[in-house]
Image (cartoon, coloured by chain):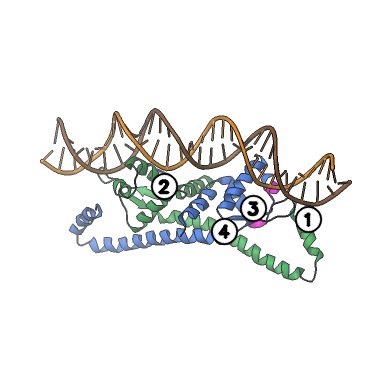
Chain colours: A blue, B green, C brown, D orange
Amino acid sequence: MDDSKLTRIFAALADPTRRDIVTRLAVSDATVGELAEPYGVSIQAVSKHIKVLADAGLVTQRKDAQRRPCHLEAEVFDLMTKWIERYRQQAQERYERLDDVLAEMRGDEHLNRQRQQGAAS
Amino acid sequence: MDDSKLTRIFAALADPTRRDIVTRLAVSDATVGELAEPYGVSIQAVSKHIKVLADAGLVTQRKDAQRRPCHLEAEVFDLMTKWIERYRQQAQERYERLDDVLAEMRGDEHLNRQRQQGAAS
DNA sequence: GCCGTTGTCAACCGATTGGTTGAATACATG
DNA sequence: CATGTATTCAACCAATCGGTTGACAACGGC
């Protein structure tokens, strides 16, 4: 659907540290400080990462005094999965159709040349 | 599985032009020149985009004289879908468990504070 | 064997990215 | 109210990214 949203989601998950954060948030919610511990980077860097994830809608933060516990939003994953599945299926079906076409061509060689010409439209 | 592969896949799909190319390749294979036509960019730019998609394993190119027809590789989408589904499910299950916990807590208020303390490990 | 077509390589450019450090904000507690 | 804690904001930096143009390689057709 929303192209820029999809862009933000994919870009967010294109970073290993952010994917790791997602992995940990799938297990349980966690504060920014907690999330920062395992990595050899500053809290500010992790804070930025979380902002990217939040802008993509993958993560939400609630208020708990000074803390901002992060929560993984599962629904957004559905959006992504749907996008991916659409093209995976299309490509798969086409591949299967091609098998049929190849079978048909086995006794009909000249169709091969014709098909290649037609493809360069 | 392979983290750097996943990084390349997500990064490849984080660009709208490249997602569009994927869309078109889902319908049928196409040469670099054919793919370049609809966009207001040079063939070289599209060639680079295809290189990124190829490095991510999303696209393969075969040789046909000067032409390099591009083909969408459906299997790679499975890898992505699997990764996504893992965390989507985990987060979903946790959310459902939380519902149970909240139901349990309804007559047992002190458990709430205990849970919040325990989370800050 | 030369010409046109198709695509890649190379160098360059401005914008974005992931990181840093330092200051500022928001809050709970003594 | 002063202090410590948790987080974000701001400015900066090097590296990467998406784009450009120009040169070059590979191939088919006259």
Residue B46 placement (x, y as % from top left): 36, 44
On the question of residue A18 being in view, the answer is yes
Q: Which amino acid does label 3 sit on?
A: Arg
Real-space Cα distance between discs 4 and 1?
28 Å
Real-space Cα distance between discs 2 and 1?
46 Å
Q: Which mark is residue A63?
A: none
Q: Answer left or right for B26 relative to B10.
A: left
Residue at 19%, 61% (x, y): give it: A108
Q: Mark 3 points at which residue?
A: A24
Q: Is residue B92 above or below residue B4?
A: below
Give the magenta range. Answer: A26-34
Question: Does label 2 lie on the same chain as label 3?
Answer: no
Name the foreground residue: B109 vs D11.
D11
Numbered disc 4: what chain?
Answer: B
The kind of secondary structure element at disc 3 is helix
Q: Mark 2 points at which residue?
A: B53
Q: In this view, does A2 lie above or below A14?
A: below
Q: Is residue C16 above or below residue A95?
A: above
| Disc 3 packing (10 Å; few <14; some 14–19; many ≥20) | some
Q: Which mark is residue B117?
A: 1
Q: Which amino acid does label 1 sit on?
A: Gln
